[in-house]
Amino acid sequence: MNSKIMETNTVQGLDQEVLRYAVDLRSDTLTRPTPEMRQAMANAEVGDDVYGEDPTVNKLEKRAAEIFGKEAALFVPTGCMGNLISIKIWTHHGDEVICDVLGHVNLYELASMSAIAGCMPRPVQGVDGILNWKLIEAAIRPKIYYDSQTALVCLENSHNMAGGMLYTSAQIAKICEHAHTVKLKVHLDGARVFNASVALGESVAEICRKVDSVMFCLSKGLGAPVGSMIVGSQEFIDKGRVYRKMFGGGMRQAGVLAAAGLLALEKSPARLHIDHEHAQLLAKAAASIPGLRIDPSKVRTNILIFDCSQTGKTAVQFCDALAAHGVLAQDTALYSVRFVTHCDVDRAGIDRAITVLREVVAKTVSVGA
């Protein structure tokens, strides 16, 4: 998603008043805290979390562990830090991490697993972003002294750059069982695992039952303003607390953030199906517009990525054209445009986005003709 660096980004030049009323589908990270969250933040009981004395953070961590069926959890500032801490715990310098080639840990975390954890990604081409044991097994290094060694498998559910594609609990369990047999750990980048849970009709505990660790975000579809969680065994979390501090993530009176996170964790999953329905509406509309290409049957959660190459515009140009009409999207490749639905875009916003989408393509086609 870095092509905007090389071209003019209209979004940055838009008036703040325009941005305020835009239909913002760039990401579900753009969600704003609800009035209830703001009130909970204002009233939060706090203490020093580095000392383990913030009661609201402790409550959030305990509740997250309960929901995921794991021993313990740790509140971290970001999902990237949560993934990095997990990778650091399960690897040694020189090890390799098997992941999908389009995985977030491979593309969008600034090579932190190499720069900080000291290991290397071993990217594998998944099927629509989804790995299976056959693909993973082929990438495992032989046990020989002159090869770097495989230590960890990292899965992503739902898969961002694969348009929100999903692993079922059965698929994950099968990978974990094989991985554990050959003494590999499995970490789940579950930034949007609650979206996966709702789409699959499976609890997050069932989805994550066999994984050794999981990271999930409070600040995406769940709508909290800041924060992610890592969840696993008590030993894993004890080590995670050390690395969180080492990486600069030790926060003090973090209960003001955890209070919003608690509400997000308890209440937000119940409405995620609405975001999925909105994504389906957008996908079906895009599929019906000559010049855009997408398979709506592959849109399972709140992410859709469509191809705009037949419009004669690059993804950056197409996003800029949408932005000029108050609809914000994100380019993910030269001709790929991503929409992400979330709680701050209602049905009226979706309808407006569809109207603008049709108008922009129609104008592009008429100009080209």
Image (tube, helix red, strand yellow):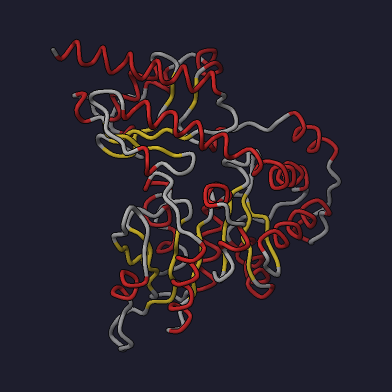
Q: Which of 326 and 16 is in front in this view?
A: 326
Q: Quadrant of the N terminus?
A: top left
Question: Is residue 104 depicted above or below 288 in this figure?
Answer: below
Question: Is residue 221 depicted above or below 13 in this figure?
Answer: below
**Percent position of residue 198, x then y:** 57, 47
Which residue is rendered at x = 42% and y = 61% of the image? Answer: 115
Q: In which quarter of the image is the C terminus?
A: top left
Kindly give the residue lying farthest to the bottom in the view shown: 144
**Percent position of residue 135, x then y:** 31, 69
Picture quadrant where residue 36 is located: top right
Q: Can residue 245 be seen in this view?
A: yes
Left or right of residue 307: residue 66: right
Left or right of residue 248: residue 113: left
Left or right of residue 1: residue 230: right
Q: Nearer the viewer, residue 47 or 295?
A: 295
Which residue is rendered at x = 55% and y = 26% of the image? Answer: 345
